[in-house]
Image (spheres, grey):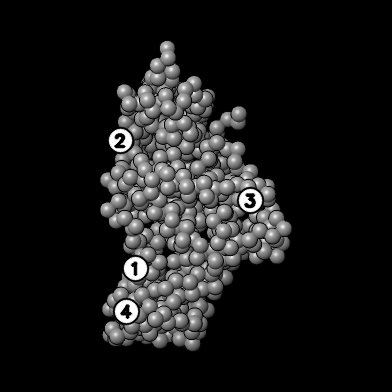
Amino acid sequence: MTKIRVSVRNTKSTYVTSKGLTQVKTEFEFLKKDKRAEIAERIRQAREYGDLTENSEYDSAMEDQSLMENRIAELEEILKSAKVITEKHTQDFVVIGSTVKIEMDDGIDEFTIVGRVEADPSKKRISNESPLGMSLLGAKKGEEVEVTTPIVRYKCKVLEIR
Amino acid sequence: MKKPLILFYPNLPLLSKNEMQVLDLLIEAGKQIVPIYSEQEKQAEHQFSKVELEKAAKNDSAILDPYTVVEKINGKLIATPYHIKYAKLLKPVADTLLRASRLTNNKEFGKALAIQAKALLDGTYDQATIAWLKTKQYILDISISPVEHLDDKLFFGKASYQAWVGILDKEGTERFNNYKSITLSARRKALMPKERIDGHNKIKAQVIDVVLFSGLMARTKFVGVNLPVDVEFVEKYGSEVTLFNQPNDLRIKEQILPTFNKIFSKPFKQGFTKEDLRRGYLRMVALHELAHSYLYYRHAVQNLADLFQSIYELSATVLGLRMAGYLLLKDRITNKQVESMIVTFLCRSFYLAGKGKSNKSMVNYNLGGAIFVNYMLECGAIKLKEELVIPNFMKIFVALHDLSYMLEKLLASGTRKDAEIFVRKYAKLNLLTEIF
């Protein structure tokens, strides 16, 4: 029987592996200490060229500063809501960290479900917040679930859970 | 008739002096294809029938070879290889390529240029294709050869001379390869596994900022190509998919935007920016070209004959759009991005089946456009109301699945007769001409 799962993003926790958490912390520290100082120095130097209205060095440094501050804010949020996934997990049903083999839309695919921070579909790591990830969480081997978005609806059968 | 040459002026990355000099030579070689293709256009008016041609081919197989010119001399059909027929015009092209080959600091690229120059002069085209497939991606890119089989409806198998010259778009290429990894990593089932050749393991993918299109490319203004087309060749050596940025912008300006403004209602149009459409169309073409690698059926060209190209191209687009659904479920693209892809393909289909009918190089695509629109109408996935098109994206996705199955079945095991019945049923243009 097809199980219908409602796709609602969980905004409370951000799931990460311990390795992923270390990477987030390292990037956060680098941006706050080194990168902030580097961009501040670029802005100071660009100001010395004078006339800020036609100063491309200044504009570029200000843009980089804005992007960096956004990233720092994003990483801060991730660290606040981070929930570390245990390395050992059940194979009875799909959880974050499971590697699953599925059959869907005339194809067979295999990937690991991870938190959004570590998701990279091109490397077979699918976010738990993606439509596919959300629908598969909790599914058992042999179970068929329905994955839906406002325009796409597929049936997806779980062939293996590791 | 307009000269078959288009020059684009993209913002170039910083090139070394050597790269700039080599680029100039490549452009020169590309321009030298123009008189050869113009000759081919003149020769497309035949003095004999298809029946005569097929009869003569029984005694001389060279008549149906993609790289020969067939002429009636003293009442007899004679086939002359391209490299002999066009020898005078090909010599300057080969000389320019050899100059570029000697000048470039990239030895591998230089070697491929030299092999390409030789191929133009002695007809060893396969050797050149293999050399290019083995060459690592480089900042400069050129394709200069008779390759596609589009212009000549009588032969439906004769290659046309074409060239493109461009610069590698590194960021675009990275994004394209990311799509490739996601879409081609899932193993798609084949309708007839023994008939299908698995081509998806050896695909090179690149995005190019185009400087020049000449010959057939200047007529078709393709936004993407997947070459070579010979399935057995692909099985052995792989293929290369190339997307073209500036021709995409041109397609949006000339075909997609005018059609978009004409066929959709004002509230619907407000949901899409020009940038949505530009990116949507390029994504659609990217997935179309990647989808080809799941559709290499061993005997499809022979079985479907002159209808092969229409079925094959439409099948790739439809499968590509289904693959977009897969990217959506993995959070790699958004609903809006998938909708933009569908909307731009609808625009392209209406354009091809309507205004685009006069372009004789695009006959196969016109047919595909008509089939797509009529099938979507039949399924109620799009509706026509007061000369406007109303799409239902959910229904379109369901219809894509069924249409994809029918088209792939034709490629896997259909006959020319099956394809003809299918085309007769869906390629009616009457509904579309009401709009245009």
Task: Please tell me whether mark 2 or mark 1 is closer to you in this view.
Answer: 1
Q: Chain of mark 1?
A: A
Answer few, some or many: residues within 10 Å of disc 3's Cα (few below 14, many 20 plus, some between 14 and 19): some
Looking at the picture, how far across and down is residue B191, in whole percent? 34, 57
Q: Chain of mark 4?
A: A
Q: In this view of the protein, which residue sits in the foreground, B19 or A29?
A: B19
Answer few, some or many: residues within 10 Å of disc 2's Cα (few below 14, many 20 plus, some between 14 and 19): some
Q: Are marks 1 and 3 on the same chain?
A: no
Residue where numbered disc 2 is placed? B127
Residue where numbered disc 1 is placed? A109
Q: CA distance from mark 4 to mark 1?
A: 15 Å
Q: Amino acid at mark 1?
A: Asp
Residue where numbered disc 3 is placed? B431
Q: CA distance from mark 3 to mark 2?
A: 47 Å
Q: Amino acid at mark 4?
A: Gly
The numbered disc on residue A142 is 4
Secondary structure at badge 4 equals loop
In primary-sequence order, the first of circles 4 and 1 is 1
